[in-house]
Amino acid sequence: MFYEAVLPNGMKIAAQKLPHFRSVSLGVWVGTGTVKERPSEAGISHFIEHMLFKGTHSRTAAGIAAEMDRIGAVLNAFTSKECTCYYAKATGEHLNDIAEILSDMVEHSAFDPAEMEKEKSVVVEEINMSEDTPEDVVMELLSAAYFAGSALAHPILGTRESVRSFAREDLLDYTRRHYSPENMLLAAAGNFEEEELYACAQRWFGAETTPIPPVEYPRSQPAGGVRTAFAQKDIEQCHLALALPGLCPLDAGYYPMLVLNNALGGSMSSRLFQHIREERGLAYSVYSFNSSYRSCGTLGFYAGTGASQGGTVLKLMLDELCDVRAHGLTEEEFVRSRDQLKGSYALANESTGARMNAIGKSKLLYNALRTEEEVTAAIEAVTFEEVNAVAKTLLDPAQMTAAFVARSEGIEEEAKALLGG
C-alpha cells in the first residue's frame, strides 16, 4: 500500500513503507525539465541540477559531501525532459538527516557566481563527451527528428552557447517559476514510519510561500510520417536508431506493448538480438526500448554495426518489424517474453531506490500509483491476441523516424529508399 499526503503549502508526498529493507530512499521531484525551458533557457534545468550540489547559504559543496559520507548515505540527481529529481539513500534512522540536506540544497542553493563559472566548464565538457559518444549522438538526432517542432525535441544538456550565457539571476528566476511547493513531490520508499516522514516533510519542506500557478506542459506529439536524420563522424561504426509511436503507462495497450518490445529487442532471446548479433554477427549492441512521456510514447530500436553494413542491418531490422506486424509473434515468443518481463521487473524492484523512482515518476507525471503486485498482475493478464494487435497498430513503417551516425552519408539515402521517405 502507498502512503499519500499533501502539506499545507501544497507539496505532495507519495511513499511506500518497506519494513524488510534497512534503507530508505528519498527523492525531491520537481515538475520541470527541458519541455518547460524558454529558447534562451536551453539546458537550464540540467545546469540548476548541477548547481544545487555546489553549496548553499550554510554549506559548501565539500560540506554537503562530507555530511552525506558521515552517515553512509548516497546523494545524486538527474534531469529528464519532463522532470528533475534530487535523491538520497541512507539507513532508516537517517531519514531526517537526508531530508534536511535535500531541503537545504533545493531551497537554499547559493548559486555562487564563481562556482557557476566553474560548473559551466563542467557542463560544456559533458556536452563534448556526449558529442564524442556516437550512441548518444544518434539518440539525440532521433529525438530531434521524431519530435520535430515540439519541446521534447530539445536536448537536456542545452548548447555550449546557452550554458555559457546563464547568469545568476536566470537561475533564480527559473527556480522561482518552477521550484514551488505545488510543483514538487516528495517520494520515499523503504524503512520509515509514516508519521516520521510527514513530520520531516513538514519540518524541512513545509514553509509557506506565495502560490505560483504551475507552468503547464505543452502536449508534445511525434511529428509523424517518415523522417530521417544523419550526422557525419569519422568513426569505425555506423550507429542507427529507429523510432515509432509508442504508448503511455495509462494507455490500454501499454503492457502488451512492453511484452512486444521485450520480444523484439529487450532480451538475449529477442528477435533482433538473435537474428542480427547471434546468427549473423553484424552487431555487438542491438536492442529495442520504450520511452514514455506525459502525452505520448516512443518505441525505439538501436544497432551499432560496421561502417559498410549499416544498410544491411537497417533492412534486417525493418524486415523483422514488418514480419511481426504482418504475422505476429509466435505463441512461444509471447510466453517467453511475458515471463521474462515479469521476472526482470521483479529484479529491478529489489532496491528502495528503484521503488522510489517508480513512485516519483508515476505520481508526478501521471498522478497514478501501482503496487508491484498490481504491475505484475497487469503483465500476467496480457494476452497473445493483445500483443499481436498492438504490433499491427504500432509497427507501421509509414510512421518511422530513422537516425544515423556514420562516416558516409550513403546510409541515409538507403534508408529513404527502404522507407519510401
Image (spheres, rainbow, N blue to C red):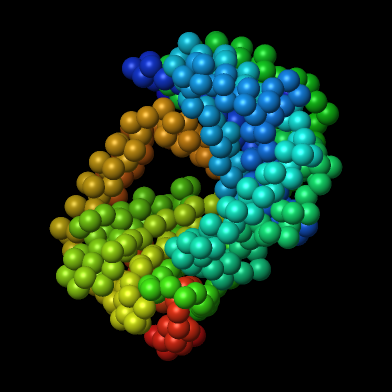
User: Where 298 falls versus 46 (above or below)?
Assistant: below
Residue 334, by quadrant, is bottom left
Residue 61 pos. (x, y %): 65, 29
Q: Residue at x 28, y 68 (%)?
A: 283
Residue 354, by quadrant, is top left
Residue 391 pos. (x, y %): 34, 65
Q: Residue at x 56, y 71 (%)?
A: 145
Residue 253 pos. (x, y %): 40, 55
Left or right position of 78 against 213: left
Split into 4 quadrants, where in the image is the N terminus? top left
- Between 380 and 52, the residue placed more toward the observer is 52
Left or right position of 19 against 90: left
Left or right position of 338 against 314: left
Q: Residue at x 63, y 22 (%)?
A: 63
Left or right position of 199 against 305: right
User: Where 19 falls versus 248 (above or below)?
Assistant: above
Residue 43 pos. (x, y %): 67, 52
User: Where 228 falls versus 348 (above or below)?
Assistant: below
Residue 27, by quadrant, is top right
The answer to whether residue 145 shows anywhere in this view is yes
The number of numbered discs placed on residues in the rendered structure image is 0
The answer to whether residue 194 shows anywhere in this view is no
Q: Residue at x 56, y 42 (%)?
A: 78
- Between 298 and 123, the residue placed more toward the observer is 123
User: Where 367 falls versus 405 (above or below)?
Assistant: above
